[in-house]
């Protein structure tokens, strides 16, 4: 694989992943699932992207353009650590420290547990 095809694969996958992220959030809001708890939409999206990442590594050839497209591009664009961090800080600033702690703990624990279950 040459570096140009790798870059294009990540670029295209990232665009698809970012669109999935935006669409997933908007879809949850439209269904009335999140209301004022938008950070839990990020939680759900990050868990789904973590699960998808496991399958991307399982079912794509190692170090291939396809793996870069799906794992780095789509899954990387779909999940978001920066939003997770920002939403956690906002919860703390709003005096919702317990909810912030639950959000952080649940995000890390559930994503880790899901990946452990799927990797076997």
Image (cartoon, rainbow, N blue to C red):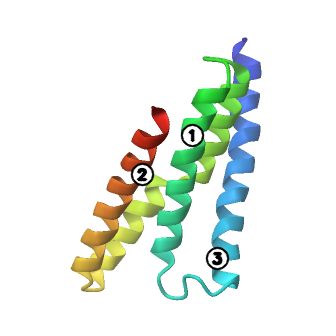
State left or right for residue 113 relative to residue 74.
left
The circle drawn on residue 28 is 3
Q: CA distance from mark 3 to mark 2?
A: 19 Å
Q: Categorize mark 2 by other alpha carbons within 10 Å: few (<14), some (14-19), many (20+).
A: some
Residue bearing mark 2: 111
Residue 101 percent location from the top left of the image: 25, 69
Q: Are marks 2 and 1 in contact (CB under 8 Å)?
A: no
Q: Are marks 3 and 2 in contact (CB under 8 Å)?
A: no
Image point 67% across, 43% down: which residue? 74
Residue 28: image quadrant is bottom right
N-terminal-most mark, 2 or 1: 1
Residue 46 drawn above or below residue 87: above
Q: Is residue 7 above or below residue 92?
A: above
Residue 3, above or below 26? above
* Callout 2: SS: helix
**Quarter location, residue 59:** top right
Vertical order, 63 against 119 (above or below): above
Q: Position of residue 108 (x, y in %)?
A: 34, 54
- Left or right: residue 116 versus residue 53 is left
Give the number of marks.
3
Which of disc 1 and disc 3 is earlier in sequence? 3
Report the residue at 47% width, 73% height from top.
40
In the image, is 89 to the left or to the right of 86? left
Which quadrant would the C terminus be assigned to in this image?
A: top left
Q: In the drawing, does residue 20 fall left or right of residue 103?
A: right
Measure the alpha-carbon separation of dots 3 and 1.
Answer: 21 Å
Q: Which residue is mark 1?
A: 53
At label 1, counting other C-alpha atoms closer than 10 Å, the crowd grade (few under 14, some 14-19, many 20 or more) is many
Which numbered disc covers residue 93? none
Q: Quadrant of the N terminus?
A: top right
- Secondary structure of the residue carrying tag 3 is helix
Q: Check whether the beta carbons of the residues at disc 3 and disc 1 lie within 8 A of each other.
A: no
């Amino acid at each position: 694989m040459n570096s140009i095809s790798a870059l294009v694969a990540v670029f295209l996958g990232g665009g698809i992943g970012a669109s999935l992220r935006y669409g997933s959030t908007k879809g949850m809001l439209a269904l009335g699932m999140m209301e004022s708890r938008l950070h839990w939409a990020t939680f759900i999206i990050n868990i789904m992207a973590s699960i998808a990442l496991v399958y991307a590594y399982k079912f794509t050839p190692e170090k291939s353009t396809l793996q870069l497209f799906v794992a780095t591009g789509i899954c990387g664009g779909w999940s978001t650590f920066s939003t997770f961090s920002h939403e956690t800080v906002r919860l703390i600033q709003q005096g919702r420290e317990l909810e912030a702690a639950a959000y952080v703990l649940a995000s890390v624990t559930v994503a880790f547990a899901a990946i452990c279950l799927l990797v076997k």
